[in-house]
Amino acid sequence: MKTHIFRRYPARITGVFLLNMLYLALTIFMFLMIEPFLRLLFYGNLQGVSPLSAYVVQSLSRFFSLEKIQGAFAIVVLFAAVLLLFRNLASYGSQWVMAHVRSDFLYRLRNKLYDKMIALPLGYFNKENRGDAVTRAVNDTQDVEYTILTAYQQLLTAPIALICYLLFLFYIDYQLTLWSLLLIPASFLLIGFLSHALRRSSKTYRQRLGVLLSHVEETLSGLRVIYGFNAQKASHEKFDKLNRQFLARQLTVFRLTYLASPLSEFLSVIAVMVVLVIGGLLVLSDRSSLSAPLFITYIALFSQIIEPIKNISSAVADYRRGQASMERIQDFLNIEDTVEDAPDAIPVQEFRERLDLQQVTFAYEEEPVLREVSLTIPKGSSVAFVGTSGSGKSTLVDLLMRFYDPQSGVIALDGIPAIQYKIGDYRSLFALVSQDVILFHDTLYHNITLGREVPMEEVVAAAKVANIYDFITSLPDGFDHVVGDRGMALSGGQRQRISIARAVLRKAPILLLDEATSAMDTESERLVQQSLEELSKRCTVVTVAHRLSTVQNADCIYVLSAGNIVESGRHEELMLREGAYWKLVVSS
């Protein structure tokens, strides 16, 4: 993942490198103009300049006459200004090209994270908090841009710039340069220690941010409960505790981050001061070939070392901080997909004969929720699963749709194990209407179609079958009405009928009803039940029911207890046995 930026954008990265090299060359060339400028200013001639400056003067002499002092002075200044202009254009060009790399890299990374998020098994979010996943997808990716991508950009040229400056400095006076380099290794050791501490703190910082966001998400989802039980104080106290823990780690990260740049700058300035003292003594002692104008050029060039040293130290610190975020992203992307297509998965387009469960056993943790369940659902039939809470009814529905795969046993469609089909094709054979209806902050049209381009007449027909058309047309915006966050402004029955309209529009051959009317009032249940009866005429229906009155006409009723099927048959047969089903009916 860390090297993909170079593999994916070789031309742009090369362009950034070349533009930065041009910037560096123009910078050095511009500083080499200092000595001729000072010679003209203080001595009135260009005699005695160093070989490097002499090369610059000779190059200018090919195009301009430098014999007159005033003219030469103006040309040197003008040439320096032109160099400065093109140097800044090269810098802007480098940033302009790199902007595309940074933006596109983050765009692709966010897409990968989102695709991973919606491909994860449902069981993952039973163990992990959703706030942490949001943190990785948003905050961690943003941190990668501010840190790792910035570090890449700096490390692409800063080391080369440092080497080039040092080569020129060694050429001007190697003894003075050796003295000045004594402090540079010490600065890198200090920055290395600082960056290591920063990486550790950044990882904890991101983890605590995920916990904080998870609590916020839970609070917004459970506001009715918090208000109903006057739990605002307890909720605030928990948030305050989490916020303080996050604040403490955030302060540590900020302080370490802000320390890196001034520390490196301080050490670099100390090095410049050492050069000023030693170089000044050499110039004054007349024991060196270093002239005053050349020494000033040397100081100007040496001062440029501060920038690449700062960039390198900042890049190392940034990389360490961003590495914690990148590791969290990589860990998330490496989560094993427990439900995925087999390498040789086959397509499926229709449901022909039957759906079988053969000795199916499933457990979320260690204790099985279903134990060696076997049954057959013929095409066109209506079957129901009933039982007490925790008996495994809803788990059966999840297994049928391959939200999970069983630990042992086989679920087969038309005699072929479901794991041999392509997941998308297999799930397209089912339409699910569950107790927990999820509506998105979008229009009613898009909540019914779920992103598909469907003719309006088909959406209208689906709404009529679901007994929701009259309500929708009574709204000022009709199908363009935005339902708001999770559709909470609608009643439970209205949300459920919108869910049924989705199922109608899907035109799937198998309809799964997971306690679709359990939390409704009598009138809402009557309307929804009418919709379901109309829909069931076209499908094979599998119902999970809490209200047993809704399943009395099923072709076969399966009674579950502690993950086992303890009874099965039609309503009349099971009532005559006076067994587990009879007890459920009597107690309901």
Image (cartoon, helix red, strand yellow):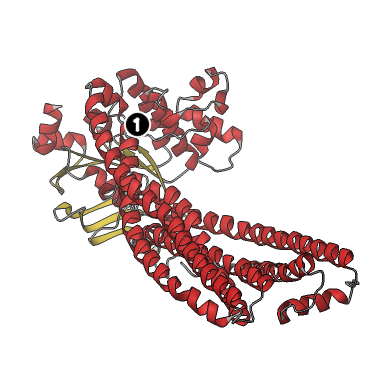
Task: Judge whether 78 appears above or below 60 on screen.
Answer: above
Q: Which residue shows up at 52% across the image and 27% down it?
A: 482
User: Whole-percent x and y of residue 365?
Assistant: 18, 54
Task: Please indicate, yes or no, whether residue 544 appears anywhere in the rendered image.
Answer: yes
Q: Is residue 489 left or right of residue 579?
A: right
Task: Judge whether 188 appears above or below 455 on screen.
Answer: below
Quadrant hosting residue 235: top left
- Which residue is more in the foreground, 236 or 430? 236
Q: Is residue 438 left or right of residue 66?
A: left
Helix or strand or loop: what does disc 1 sit on? helix
User: Whole-percent x and y of residue 508?
Assistant: 45, 45
Task: Judge whether 70 appears above or below 291 on screen.
Answer: above
User: Whole-percent x and y of residue 514?
Assistant: 30, 38
Q: Which residue shows up at 13% across the image and 32% down it?
A: 584
- Which residue is more in the foreground, 474 or 192? 192
Q: Which residue shows up at 30% across the image and 19% down it?
A: 522
Question: According to the image, label 1 marks what residue?
Answer: 220
- Which residue is more in the foreground, 136 or 552? 136
Instruction: Give the residue furthest to the left.
Output: 578
Quadrant hosting residue 86: bottom right
User: Whole-percent x and y of residue 261?
Assistant: 46, 57
For the image, the number of numbered tags is 1
